[in-house]
Image (tube, grey):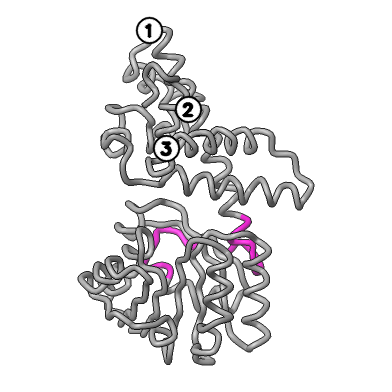
Amino acid sequence: MATIAFIGVGNMGGGMAANLAKAGHSVRAFDVSDAALARAVAHGCTGAATGGEAAAGADAIITMLPAGDFVRAAYDGVLFAAASPHAILIDCSTIDVATAKSVGEAAAQRGLAMVDAPVSGGTAAADAGTLTFMVGGPEAAFAAAKPILEQMGKAVIHAGGAGMGQAAKICNNMILGATMVATAEAFVLAEKLGLDAQTFFDISSKASGQSWSMTSYCPVPGPVPTSPANRDYQGGFAAALMLKDLKLAVAAATTAGASVPMGAQAEALYQLFANNGGGGQDFSAIIRLLRGPARGQ
């Protein structure tokens, strides 16, 4: 079993670190939140006072941080210096492609193996160990990271060189964000036309309107008992995080010269929803915005 440093054990990282500890690894956790760190310790991790303390001598260093600036600061400030030459560095944060490439190149210049490995699946999959990992980096680094990632997920896919894991993540979540908006619009239209939500689900989930947003994360209560709609849109994948991913996708499209009108419209709608206090709700709660003021909130 390996010694693994896990930096960032919040909503996503906490479940991931717990699964590594459950698999028998020695997991040293660090987080700026005392509550998050306490939860990680309660699930079998050892608490560390600093990121450098967690990383020193570890076989693997995993980061799950909120933005590219945090990732760059963590590696440049502490983790590169603390990392053993044999360690595999795995950044599971969702950040911009340029930063992922830059940090990966900085690791290579120091002779360290590193991958960017953002995840898909949300907190439920993090807790259950059923995440999908989209991994960017050299083949050898991917081979070193894969056995560790497999103990936190159901699928580990090599997307290409440094930064390509992030590219895959933001493209995937742009689809998800836009699809959820369209799915929610359809349920609102069905309501206004007098079509029962369960009946519409029974039809569309078996017809050409079927999607993950429909069958796994249905935005209305009832048809999919495990969807956040049945918990007043609490838990799951916060709308603020979806907005972050859509902003990353639209910014990347601007840089690459790609046209993403649907992605841009989804970003605008999630921005409006967040501005009206919806950022902490699950992203499927966008249906509340689309219903309008009469039934929206």
Q: Nearer the viewer, mark 1 or mark 3?
A: 3
The residue at 45%/20% (across/down) is: 292
Q: Where is mark 1, residue-wise? A: 194
Question: Neighbour class for label 2 at 10 Å: few (<14), some, many (≥20)?
Answer: many
**Residue 207: where, in percent of width, then height?**
46, 23
Mark 1 to mark 3 CA distance (whole Å): 29 Å
Near-viewer residue (128 or 203): 128
Mark 2 to mark 1 CA distance (whole Å): 17 Å
Residue 295 image label: none
Residue stretch rendered in magenta on the structure: 149-167
Identify which amino acid the numbered label 3 is placed on. Gly
**Residue 162: where, in percent of width, then height?**
65, 69
Mark 2 to mark 3 CA distance (whole Å): 21 Å
Identify which amino acid the numbered label 1 is placed on. Gly
Near-viewer residue (252 or 154): 252
Q: Secondary structure at mark 3?
A: helix
Q: Secondary structure at mark 1?
A: loop
